Amino acid sequence: MNASTLSSSCAHSSLGAQTDMLSRYAGYFRTQLANSPALLRIAQAIRYQVYCLERKFEDQAEHDDCLERDVFDDRSIHALIFHRATQEAIGTARLIPFSDADLLQPIRKLLRENGLRARDHVPLATTAEISRFAISNHFRRRVGDNGAKEALASECRGNLPCLGLIQELLRQSVARGVTHWAAVMEPKLLRMLAAMGIHFTPVGPLVDHHGLRQPSYCSLSQMLERMKNERPDHWMVVTDAGALMPGNFAAQEQRAA
């Protein structure tokens, strides 16, 4: 085998691995908007499971109906990820648009309290805050406990649910002209996302927000380009094989700057 043939073979193998991850994701999971009262309650029930019971982020006693909700829910775009085999919702996340001037998003409030301004880092008109990103460990454990095949348990406990939620957030961002994401995250979560090829830029110091958190942001076009180079298999899932990479991303960012 000559060098040219070897290079072609390696490229074909790499593309196959990337496509395989996307196929596995599509086979195990699906996402949709929580755009009805019933679906929003499902998202809030997952948040209660994760933030009140699993992570102790919120006080369980303050949520008698076992739903975790706040003042931002009515103005947010909510996403759910479902496990196809059981049709059970296992995770949720939301986008809070920055265009709402009457109620500061959590990151803008925290930055202001530390003498910083979001507008110095992101274009307010086309930025949204990622919030309440939650995938239930209860479901992940139960998949294996119920005698499911080890491959299924591995998929549910791996990165695919997280990548799927990010795909849906990206889909909704593209549809709404969002060019930047902001978030207030645990340093551990930032490191986990970076290992998956999803890089955020820290803004200012750690802040006390239910424990130490790091305000951060990313440009979607730059984040996705770096992910494509570092983790092309993850990029395939997040962008749905490039379908969520519109050519006008850069133009949108320039207009918003």
Image: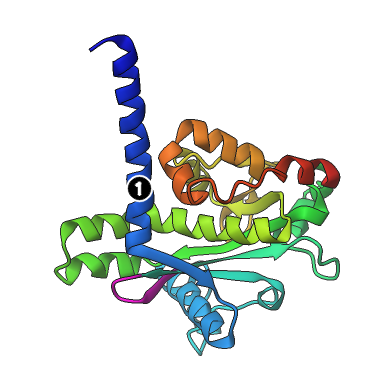
Q: What residue type is disc 1 on?
A: Met
Which one is nearer the viewer's eye here, 240 or 103?
A: 240
Considering every residue shown, the one lying at the far bottom of the view is 65
Q: Secondary structure at mark 1?
A: helix
Residue 110: image quadrant is: bottom right
| Residue displayed at 35% across by 32% down | 14
Q: Position of residue 25 (x, y in %)?
A: 37, 56
Q: Position of residue 209 (x, y in %)?
A: 62, 58
For residue 191, above or below residue 243: above
Confirm whether the magenta stretch covers residue 207.
no
Q: Is residue 110 above or below residue 50?
A: above
Residue 133 place in picture, x, y as percent: 53, 62
Residue, x 54% and y 51% (percent of image)? 186
Q: Please tell me which residue is depicted at 82% across the width and 55% down the height of the picture.
A: 125
Front position in the image: 248 or 136: 248
Direction from residue 51 to residue 84 in the image, left or right: left
**Image: 126 above or below 80:** above
Q: Is residue 56 visible?
A: no
Which region shows up in magenta?
84-91
Q: Residues within 10 Å of mark 1 (few under 14, many from 20)?
A: some
Residue 13 shown left or right of residue 244 in the figure:
left
Left or right, 148 with respect to 255, comes to: left
Q: How is the protein colored in the picture?
A: rainbow
- Can you identify the residue that label 1 sits on? 21
The N terminus is located in which quarter? top left
Judge whether residue 112 can be spotted in this image: yes
Total count of labels? 1
Q: Is residue 111 above or below residue 199?
A: below
Q: What residue lies at 82% left-to-right and 40% top-to-bottom?
A: 254
